[in-house]
Image: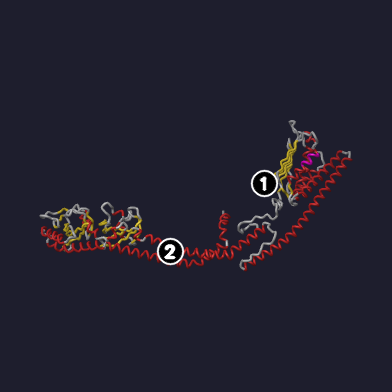
Amino acid sequence: MLRRLRDRLEFTRGLGFRLGTLLSVAILPLGLISLIQNLNLAREAERSAEIALMGRTASAAAGERALLQSALGSADALGPAVLEALDRPQVCADLMRNFIERSATYVYAGFTRLDGRSDCNSGANGGVAADMRQSPAFKAFLAQPGTMVTSVERGIVSGRSVVLVMQPLYRDRELLGYVGLSLTHELLQSTHAMAFATDGARIVTFNQRGEILTSDLSQDGSARDIIPRDTDLIGLLSRSETSFRAISGSGQERVFTVVPVVPGLVYALGSWSPKIAGLGLFQLSRFGAVTIPIALWLASLGVAYFAVFRLVLRHITVLRGQMRRFAIGNRSEPPPVLSDAPTEIADVSQTFHNMARILIRDEETMEEAVAEKTVLLKEVHHRVKNNLQLIASIINMQSRMIENSQARGVLRSVQDRVAALATIYRNLYQAEHLDAVEADRLIGDIVNQLANASVGPGSDLNISTEIAPLTLLPDQAVPLTLLATEAFTNALKYAGTPAGGSAPWVSIRLSETEPGRALLVIENSVGDASRDSDGDGTGLGGQLIEAFSTQLDGEAEIQSMDDRYALRLEFKIVAPSMIGVSDPRNVVLTSAAREGSRH
């Protein structure tokens, strides 16, 4: 896991990456300063736009503000007159009707007592009092007496949709009721600025209890479509931002501004489309505040990298390619010196050229010396093989002249051992690499040789071999082959007919049990005749097997059973240095210099 992660991060060791990192750190302060300045400019521009939106909202509600403030002032002015005529309902009602007739602004004026009776109003006729107890406005006043502006869907006296302005009336400190003036919604909406008649801008007024008073929508529309979704209007009064963005009830993203119309009583909520509010411009300015420094940073890195690539990296790439080709064996001539490279890199290229020229010369000399020594060593092996074959032939000739069968058997065993040595040396001088011997091939030759010499025509002896490919050093191959010769000779000699009348057999197996460990097993069948001859022989074969086992750093294990006799030898493999290498120049190159790489 760690190695895989390290390989993925290998690019961080490159010159280009490190140079880019250093340049990034160098220009980071300038980039941060530019980023901060751009963000401040964007924030100031956004703040200016917010102030402009608030000003436009306040301007749009200016007419409604004047009407409501005038209504509050008129209600205050009517208070003393109501107190004087409070006991004369008809006089008070006439006063209210005269006030309505002289003013074209209001549709209702009147005084409502705390018991809900109103016999002093502009609609009273013949002293008949109006009952206000079921009016939501009256209930709201009783719940929280004070100056109040509220919307009434249908006035009890006027019968119209109005906005009611209520001003409490006191005598000394006693609350008597409230003086109310009504303005129609149409009149209040007509005072809004014409800009709010477009689809892009709307205005909604609401009182301190969050009740909507007026809106710019038509009769078919709903004021909830242009105010923030799932937002209580009272909650807007506690926001620290007077301008914000949110999703409206119709699902559109809009910009909202909140300004007071009558402080503490009535507020205006401006609802703006992003296009009119300049929302896209704000986003673009913030985006530009971030992207411009990043673009400048990338441009600086690009220019710096291009300069480094032209001056350094491309020459290093060419030089690395020359080194790789030289490492994999392209040594017909020294690599050319880089002519257009900077002086420092040109010096490195010249040094590599000189080193390659010296290595080519020395390598040619060494190859000639190695080839000469190889030829001489193979010639020595060949002559040793010839001499051993000559000795085996002499021993064979001598054995023919001896009539004593025991002496002839001793000479025969000596001849087999000499022939085995000759076979070993034959394989040595025929091998491609002198320090690597194919033990499976060598033992196979010995087995065939001994079987052909010991098993006569018509013999029913079965010989089975199972020899896996195994390459050893000569220091291991020689004692292993001699041990196999002795053990296989004994197996051929003592192989008997097993119980049941089946044919005698001999088996030899050579395998690699695990990496670095090998196992040699030689078995033969055991019969009654072979058990009776267990004591025959000089014991020299056993001594040789023990000696060869010691040379292999193993221990021969003898297993004698009723139907078979087995010799097992497990030993450690000493791998030759040239195993699997067909060309001493065959090396593994990686795409980058890593620890453990072979170059």
* 30 lies left or right of 125: right
Viewer can see residue 318: yes
User: Which secondary structure dominates the residues rendered in magenta?
Assistant: helix
| Rendered image quadrant of residue 285 | bottom left
Q: Amino acid at mark 1?
A: Glu
Residue 514: numbered disc: 1
Residue interval drawn in magenta: 447-453
* 161 lies left or right of 327: left
Viewer can see residue 132: no
Q: Nearer the viewer, residue 369 or 166?
A: 369
* 123 lies left or right of 436: left
Asked if residue 504 is among those painted magenta in the image, a careful observer would answer no
Residue 209: x and y in percent read 27, 57
> Split into 4 quadrants, where in the image is the C terminus?
bottom right
Residue 327: x and y in percent read 67, 58
User: Which residue ends up furthest to the bottom in the rendered image?
Assistant: 343
- So how many labels did they put on this image? 2
Residue 147: x and y in percent read 22, 61
User: Which residue ends up furthest to the front in the rendered image?
Assistant: 340
Asked if residue 449 is among those painted magenta in the image, a careful observer would answer yes
Q: Nearer the viewer, residue 282 or 434?
A: 282
Under tag 1, what secondary structure?
strand
Q: Amino acid at mark 2?
A: Ala
Q: Residue at x 43, y 63 (%)?
A: 288
| Rendered image quadrant of residue 216 | bottom left
Cα–Cα gap, marks 1 and 2: 67 Å
Identify the mark nearer the N-term, 1 or 2.
2
Under tag 2, what secondary structure?
helix
Residue 232: x and y in percent read 31, 55
Residue 289: numbered disc: 2
